[in-house]
Amino acid sequence: MFTGLVTDVGTIDRVQATDAGREFRIRTSFRDLTPGESIAVSGACLTVREFGEGWFTVAAVLTTLGRTTMADWEAGRRVNLERSLAAGDRLGGHMVQGHVDAVAEVVEVQRLADALLVDIAIPPQLVPLVVLHGSIAVDGVSLTVNAITGENTIQLSLIDFTLKATTLGSLRAGHRVQVEADVIGKYVQRMLAPHLAATAE
């Protein structure tokens, strides 16, 4: 489990096809990594395969490539990194599983005083899971839904710290981002589904 609080921005320095999937070698400031540990890479939970001084590798299988933007990742790309939550750590963001639900598209970016407002179009299946001022993870960053601006469009308000500590400061209209809806909303939706279906009959 993760919190959506990015602790490092890494850079991909190699991409190659391997038996384990599309492999990424990522430069990082992380130390004391262990084989098999989980790291959220721009919001996707991946397993550390190899590591050395200032780098580690992870691989994305076909299923992961199909529901993320990773098929498009190339060397030079910056990625948000977060190591998995340890028992006793502060839960400063929200409960993030690292299971990307879908890819969304940035439709507008505008500066308003001390914040950057980012509107993104989310897939229809995620709309019921989004509530005003609720939580959502975008490229691995825990964010608050600032506004619901359309039938399937939400607005995020990014503060200066987030812009400097993550990759989100470079977002522009047309960019694709990895989105994970709040897991609590998913469970509520699942539990209510039979009752809503019975009511509709």
Image (cartoon, helix red, strand yellow):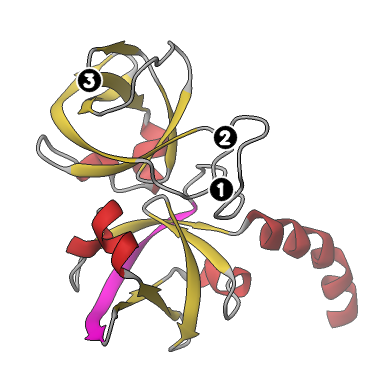
Q: Is residue 166 visible?
A: no
Q: Is residue 65 visible?
A: yes
Identify the residue position indicated by label 3 in the image. Answer: 54
Residue type, numbered disc 1: Val
Report helix, strand or loop for mark 3: loop
Report helix, strand or loop for mark 2: loop
Look at the numbered discs 3 and 2 and tell me whether their residues touch, using CB distance below 8 Å: no
Indicate yes or no whether the magenta region holds residue 104. Answer: yes
From the image, state whether disc 1 or disc 2 is nearer to you.
Answer: 2
Q: Is residue 38 above or below residue 152?
A: above
Give residue 49's position: percent from left, percent from top.
36, 14
Residue 169 placement: quadrant: bottom left
Q: Is residue 13 above or below residue 181?
A: above
| Mark 1 neighbour class, 10 Å CA radius: few under 14, some 14 to 19, many 20 or more | many
Question: Rounded to the nearest whole Å, what is the CA distance between mark 1 and mark 2?
Answer: 10 Å
Residue type, numbered disc 2: Leu
Q: Quadrant of the C terminus?
A: bottom right
Indicate yes or no whether the magenta region holds residue 5. Answer: no
Give residue 193's position: percent from left, percent from top.
79, 66
Indicate which disc, 1 or 3, sits on the residue closer to the N terminus.
Answer: 3
Give residue 153's position: percent from left, percent from top.
42, 80
Q: Which residues are magenta?
A: 101-112
Q: Which mark is residue 96?
A: 1
Identify the residue position indicated by label 2 in the image. Answer: 85
